[in-house]
Image (cartoon, rainbow, N blue to C red):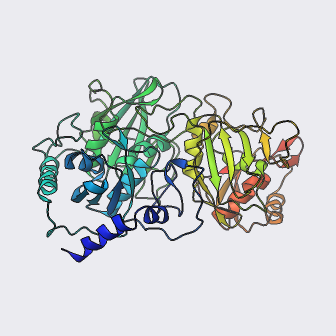
C-alpha cells in the first residue's frame, strides 16, 4: 500500500476527533480568504472549548470529508466539488464515514471551502463536515476497492468535456458547450433593494475567480456583464444561480451567456471593475461602451429554470433590511446573533463592539461574557447583517488579538435580570441614533467595504483643518500616513493610517466624535487609497 495513503488513513482514522479539532473544521460560518483562522469550530457551537492559537492546516487541494452517509455514492461525493473545478481523485472510507477529495488546484479547494463555510453541505439530508487535509495529494493507485471511485472520476472528466451527465451531480441545464463564453449577462428583476457591484462579486465569486464586472441600466432594468477566469465557472454559476432571489421574494437573477468572450473595462468605480487591473482610473462615472458590447446588451434572456440543484445557496452580501434568500439552507437559518471570540478583555467594551459591528449592520444588543471576557455575543438586526459582519470582521486584528466571529447557538441576547450582577457588560442599543441602516435605500447600503487602512470621514464642519484632524487621529495613537479632503465636498475626507488594525481601533474610538458646531464625525472604511 502506498505510504502516503497509509499516512492519510492513519491521520483520518486513528487520531479521529483530536485531529479534527486541531486542524480547523471549516463548516462553522466564518470568513476565510486563503487560510482559515485557527481553532474555529463547526456550526458556531458556543459550548466547544476554545483552543486558542493552535496550529492549523494550511489550505490544500486535498479535502477531508467527515460524517458522510454510509449509502452515499462516489458520484454524490464528487458532486460537492464539481461546481468549483476539476475533481482529480477520491478516496472513500465508508466504514469510517469519511472521504478524501482531491481538487485540481488549491484555488478550487479554497473556493469550495469558502462556499460551504456559511452553511453545512448535505448529502442524503445528512450534514457533511469538510476541512483541509494535512496532505497535498492523494495517491490511490495501489489501493483496493478504488474501481468505483475511478469510474466516477472518469464520468466527471467526460462531463467536463461536455458529452455526458454525471449521476448524482447537478444537471439543471445540460453540459458545457465547446467554445462557451466565460462572460455571463445578468438581469435583476423585481429590484426592491439596491444591488451593487460588490454584492454581485460576493455572490458569483463563490463559483470561481471573477475577473471583471460591468453594471448598467437598460430598459429600466439593472443589468451586469460578469467575466470569469474559466467558462466552466460561468457554467456552474449560471446553473446554480439562474432564477434565484438574492433577497426573499425580490431581486431575481436571470442569467444567460454573453456573446462576448472578454470584457473591456476602462474604469474601476461603482459601475465597473477589472479585478486584474488595480491601476485603472476611477473616471467620471459609468464607462463608455464599445459598439460590440452595446450590441451584446440587446440579447434576449430566457425565463429562469428555477433554483439550481447545488444545495444551499449562501449569499452573504449587503446589510439590507429584508431577509436574504437562502433556499433550503441547513443549520440555523435566520440567526442574527454572533459569537465573537479571542477579544482583548482589558480593552474591549460593549460600546466598542457596537461601533465596529455597526459598520455592517444595526447592532441591537451586545453582551461580554461575565466569566470569560474575551468572548462576547453581538445581536444584529437580522441574519443578513450578521453574515455580513462575520464575513468582514472575522480574522481581523483588534487590540493585538485576532478577532473571530461565528454564528451563535443563541437566537437573542438576553438582558440581565433586575438585581443580577453584570458590571455593565450587557448593553441594549436597539434605539441608538447611531444605527447606519435604519432608512431603506440609504446610501450606506452601497458603501459597505472590508476593513482597510484608509478611512472615509464625513460630517466635517468648515472650521476644522487638516491639522485638526491629523492631530485627532495622532492623539488616538494612530500614525497618519496621508490625508486629503474631497475636492467637491470639504465635509468629507480620506485619512490613511499605518495599518488596518490602527484604522479599526480609530473607527471605534472616533466615530461620532464631537467636532463642535453641532457636528459629530462619521467614520467608515474606504475602498480607496490616497
Q: Nearer the viewer, residue 51 or 288?
A: 51
Q: Quadrant of the N terminus?
A: bottom left
Residue 505 spot, x, y in % from top left: 73, 59
Residue 348 spot, x, y in % from top left: 76, 57
| Count of picture labels | 0
Left-right relation of 318 to 125: right
Q: Nearer the viewer, residue 529 or 428?
A: 428
- Name the residue rendered at 34%, 51% in the picture: 208
Residue 96 spot, x, y in % from top left: 31, 56
- Say above or below: 160 vs 298: below
Identify the image quadrant of residue 410.
top right
- Name the residue rendered at 83%, 49% in the picture: 513
Left-right relation of 20 to 423: left
Residue 272 spot, x, y in % from top left: 45, 45
- Say above or below: 494 vs 318: below
- Name the residue rendered at 11%, 53% in the picture: 151
Identify the image quadrant of residue 416.
top right
Decide if residue 369 is in sight here.
Answer: yes
Q: Quadrant of the C terminus?
A: bottom right
Left-right relation of 507 to 55: right
- Say above or below: 4 vs 226: below
- Say above or below: 159 vs 142: above
Amino acid at each position: 500500500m502506498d505510504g502516503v495513503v497509509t499516512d492519510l488513513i492513519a491521520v483520518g482514522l486513528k487520531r479521529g476527533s483530536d485531529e479534527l479539532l486541531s486542524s480547523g473544521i471549516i463548516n462553522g460560518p466564518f470568513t476565510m480568504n486563503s487560510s482559515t483562522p485557527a481553532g474555529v469550530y463547526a456550526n458556531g457551537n458556543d459550548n466547544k472549548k476554545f483552543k486558542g492559537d493552535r496550529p492549523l492546516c494550511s489550505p490544500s487541494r486535498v479535502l477531508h470529508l467527515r460524517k458522510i452517509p454510509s449509502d452515499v455514492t462516489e458520484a454524490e461525493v464528487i458532486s460537492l466539488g464539481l461546481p468549483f473545478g476539476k475533481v482529480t481523485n477520491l478516496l472513500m472510507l465508508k466504514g469510517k464515514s469519511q472521504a478524501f477529495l482531491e481538487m485540481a488546484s488549491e484555488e478550487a479547494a479554497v473556493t469550495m471551502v469558502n462556499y460551504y463555510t456559511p452553511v453545512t453541505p448535505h448529502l442524503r439530508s445528512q450534514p457533511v463536515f469538510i476541512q483541509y487535509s494535512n496532505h497535498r495529494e492523494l495517491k490511490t493507485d495501489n489501493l483496493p476497492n478504488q474501481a468505483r471511485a475511478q469510474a466516477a472520476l472518469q464520468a466527471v472528466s467526460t462531463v467536463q468535456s461536455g458529452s455526458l451527465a454525471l449521476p448524482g451531480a447537478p444537471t439543471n441545464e445540460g453540459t458545457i458547450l465547446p467554445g462557451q463564453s466565460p462572460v455571463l449577462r445578468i438581469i435583476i428583476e423585481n429590484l426592491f433593494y439596491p444591488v451593487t457591484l460588490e454584492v454581485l462579486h460576493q455572490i458569483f465569486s463563490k463559483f470561481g475567480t471573477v475577473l471583471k464586472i460591468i453594471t448598467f441600466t437598460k430598459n429600466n432594468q439593472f443589468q451586469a456583464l460578469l467575466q470569469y477566469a474559466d467558462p466552466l465557472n460561468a457554467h456552474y454559476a449560471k446553473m446554480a444561480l439562474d432564477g434565484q432571489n438574492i433577497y426573499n421574494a425580490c431581486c431575481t437573477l436571470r442569467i444567460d451567456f454573453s456573446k462576448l468572450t472578454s470584457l473591456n473595462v476602462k474604469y474601476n468605480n461603482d459601475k465597473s471593475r477589472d479585478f486584474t487591473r488595480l491601476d485603472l482610473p476611477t473616471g467620471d462615472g459609468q464607462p463608455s461602451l464599445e459598439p460590440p458590447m452595446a450590441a451584446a446588451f440587446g440579447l434576449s434572456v430566457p425565463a429562469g429554470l428555477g433554483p439550481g440543484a447545488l444545495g444551499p445557496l449562501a449569499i452573504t452580501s449587503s446589510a439590507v433590511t429584508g431577509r436574504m434568500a437562502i433556499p433550503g439552507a441547513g443549520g440555523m437559518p435566520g440567526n442574527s446573533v454572533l459569537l465573537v471570540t479571542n477579544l482583548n478583555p482589558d480593552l474591549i467594551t460593549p460600546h466598542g463592539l457596537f461601533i465596529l459591528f455597526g459598520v455592517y449592520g444595526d447592532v441591537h444588543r451586545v453582551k461580554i461574557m461575565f466569566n470569560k471576557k474575551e468572548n462576547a455575543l453581538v445581536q444584529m438586526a437580522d441574519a443578513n447583517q450578521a453574515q455580513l459582519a462575520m464575513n468582514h470582521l472575522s480574522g481581523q486584528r483588534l487590540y493585538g488579538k485576532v478577532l473571530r466571529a461565528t454564528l451563535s447557538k443563541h437566537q437573542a441576547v438576553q438582558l440581565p435580570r433586575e438585581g443580577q450582577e453584570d458590571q455593565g457588560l450587557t448593553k441594549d442599543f436597539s434605539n441608538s441614533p447611531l444605527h447606519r441602516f435604519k432608512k431603506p435605500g440609504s446610501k450606506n447600503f452601497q458603501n459597505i467595504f472590508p476593513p482597510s487602512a484608509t478611512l472615509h470621514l464625513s460630517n466635517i464642519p468648515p472650521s476644522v483643518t487638516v491639522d485638526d484632524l491629523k492631530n485627532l487621529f495622532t492623539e488616538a495613537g494612530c500614525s497618519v500616513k496621508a490625508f486629503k479632503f474631497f475636492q467637491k465636498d470639504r465635509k468629507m475626507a480620506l485619512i490613511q493610517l499605518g495599518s488596518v488594525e490602527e484604522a479599526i481601533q480609530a473607527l471605534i474610538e472616533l466615530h461620532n466624535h464631537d467636532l463642535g458646531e453641532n457636528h459629530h464625525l462619521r467614520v467608515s472604511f474606504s475602498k480607496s487609497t490616497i
